Image (cartoon, helix red, strand yellow):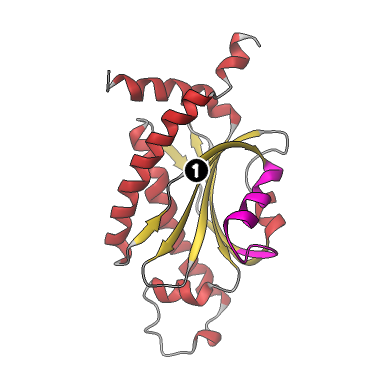
Amino acid sequence: MDIQEKDQTLGAEDLEILQEVMNIAFGRAAADLAKFINIFVKLSVPHISLISKSEISETLRSELEGMDQNVSVVRQDFWGDLTCSAVLFFPAHTENEIISIMGTDELNVEFNEISTSLAQETLLELGNILIGACAGKIAQLLETNVSFSPPFAAINEPMGEAIEQMDIHESDQILSLQTQFSFEERNLSGLLIIAGQKSSFAWIKEALTKFMAQYE
């Protein structure tokens, strides 16, 4: 393995340090989220792994019930030092609960009369808050800025299609940062996956070294 290839590979020590960064970032994000939507959001201990694109569907099926066929998603791409796709996955047919969480249940309509466009709009709002809080805290801790695309929401989309739309190549090794989340006193949970591209690995290694230097 030459030096350049080595710089583009994340080792066990890198993943261990990144785990600590994630723990801090998601802990802070959970506190911030409660201020936005007045409901406590429970984020599980983040799990970090190096996987292929094809393994994402296996992860979804094993982590969350109801992810067999269709999903509702919010997707946002980031680029800069850290290039990644962040995707919120919800089991399909949970849009009414999402609408209720975001405070639009004051509308004088039955949930089954609410249009798909309203569900998408609400999903986008929730995605902006969740993805923005988590990704933003990671960027802050690693002392970088990222640019991001407008979020995109899809309701009741085939899971394979949702994964295919992520901005990653089939042959890429992906840095998968994932956490389950649930809402206090609500029957709703989902999965957030931040999929980092291999082109960012060299920068991540350097950023992690700088992060640890402050504790030496």
Percent across and percent down for residue 42 are 38, 58
Q: Residue furthest top?
A: 2
Q: Residue at x 58, y 22 (%)?
A: 9
Q: Secondary structure at mark 1?
A: strand
Q: Is residue 85 above or below residue 62?
A: above
Which residues make up the magenta segment?
Answer: 53-71
Task: Answer yes or no: is residue 165 visible.
Answer: no
In the rendered structure, which amino acid carries the disc numbered 1?
His
Task: Name the residue carrying label 1.
Answer: 47
Q: Quadrant of the N terminus?
A: top right
Q: Residue at x 63, y 62 (%)?
A: 67
Image position of 35 (left or right of 156): left
Percent across and percent down for residue 122 are 46, 69
Image position of 203 (left or right of 42): right
37 falls in the magenta region? no
Image position of 17 (left or right of 84): left
Q: Is residue 147 above or below residue 117?
A: above
Percent across and percent down for residue 197 are 58, 34
Task: Answer yes or no: is residue 94 visible.
Answer: yes
Of 93 and 12, which appears nearest the observer? 12
Of 61 and 90, which appears nearest the observer? 61
Q: Residues within 10 Å of mark 1 (few under 14, many from 20)?
A: some
Q: Residue at x 45, y 40 (%)?
A: 147
Image position of 170 (left or right of 90): right
Percent across and percent down for residue 101 are 40, 72
70 falls in the magenta region? yes
Q: Residue at x 65, y 57 (%)?
A: 61
